[in-house]
Amino acid sequence: MQKQLSDCTILVVDDTETNIDILVDALGDEYELAVAMDGPTALDLVEELPPDLILLDIMMPGMSGYEVITHLKANPKSASIPVIFLTAMSDVGNKTKGFELGAVDYITKPFEVAEVQARVDTHLSLSLIRNELEQHNEILEEKVRERTRELSHMQDVTIQSMAVVAEYRDPETGGHIHRTQNYVRALAEQLHKEGKHRGYLDRDSIELLYKSAPLHDIGKVGVPDTVLLKPGKLNDEEWRIMKTHPIIGRDAIAASEESLGSNSFLTLAKEISYSHHEKWDGSGYPEGLLGEEIPLSARMMALSDVYDALISKRVY
């Protein structure tokens, strides 16, 4: 519920009782008032219960208004409270100093009641509007964060669902998917620590690599079981069919891009799926890319894929 002007509290800080009486008479019917006759007491009151606005005398014994506002602005709890200086001084330099310290306005003594009421009303209204906008922005930011979490969760579910499809086709794929996913992240984090490719391998990119890695063999869903599950060496024709799985994977992810729109996750997944069988010496497939022509994501996936194949039992 939006706060109303009548709900606001004003702290009056002045070492002269007459001035306090005038301000209480001028504002007491409209606002809740608190009173302090010196700087330390005012700071204690603000710490205990921050007011919505402070009317602050400049010339006070012990601690001046300038010192008080310096303490107020240094404290996150009170930094945003609007402060109006009360002063008998009309020198431009003194006013400039006050504004530089964070005051929003000046009221000159002797007080004109109508002026006091008008300036207080104006600055409280502005403060309430600012607070309302800040609260509105916080709500919007939280909604954006919530939506981002939802999209991230949907992305994770989509990846896992697609990966499970490949796992059903090939029982060995499930463990392979999770192992290579962790290998890719380990490689990426080590490269980041060493400073290599740091412009590319930031924390967000590493997380995307980790999430996208399970889709590297999604193209195998298009390979017949007679080839995919054959115990033993593939003949030339079977090998030709097997080598189409990066293309099938790329095309499947590209089809998803057409429906969902291009984004960094799908682009990376497509890159990994298509190029993870390329080799540094150019002898890989499907394009025979050489060296750094191979995307970094696919190079890390290739290392992880081959390493896992070498340490795991396979039907072939």
Image (cartoon, rainbow, N blue to C red):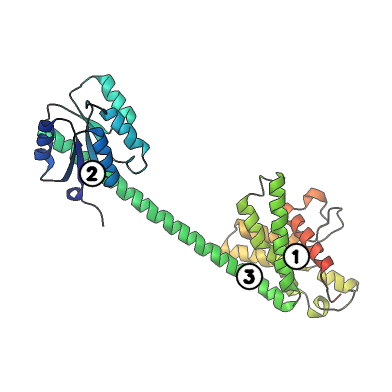
Few, some or many C-alpha atoms within 10 Å of disc 3 (few <14, some 14-19, many ≥20)? some
Residues at badges 1 and 2 in contact (C-beta under 8 Å)? no
Q: Nearer the viewer, residue 33 or 229?
A: 33
Q: Mark 2 is on which residue type?
A: Ser
Q: Which residue is mark 1?
A: 247
Q: Quadrant of residue 155?
A: bottom right
Residue displayed at 79% across by 79% down: 225
For label 2, the SS is helix
| Residue 188, position as x, y percentages in the image | 70, 53
Residue at which label 2 appears: 125
Compared to 93, does 137 lie above or below? below
Q: Tell me the crowding category of disc 2: few under 14, some 14 to 19, or many 20 or more residues within 10 angstroms, Cα based.
A: some
Q: Is residue 256 above or below residue 9?
A: below
Q: Which amino acid does the dot numbered 1 rest on? A: Ile
Q: Position of residue 90 (x, y in %)?
A: 20, 21
Q: Residue at label 3?
A: 160
| Depicted 223 relative to depicted 110: above or below | below
Label 3, label 2: how far apart the Cα atoms are: 52 Å
- In this view, the residue in front, 81 or 235, is 81
Q: Secondary structure at mark 3?
A: helix
Q: Alpha-carbon distance for marks 1 and 2?
A: 63 Å
Of mark 3 and mark 2, the one earlier in the sequence is 2
Q: Is residue 245 above or below residue 29?
A: below
Q: Residue at x 30, y 29 (%)?
A: 67
Measured in 3D between alpha carbons, the distance from the residue under mark 3 to the one under mark 1, in whole angstroms, is 20 Å
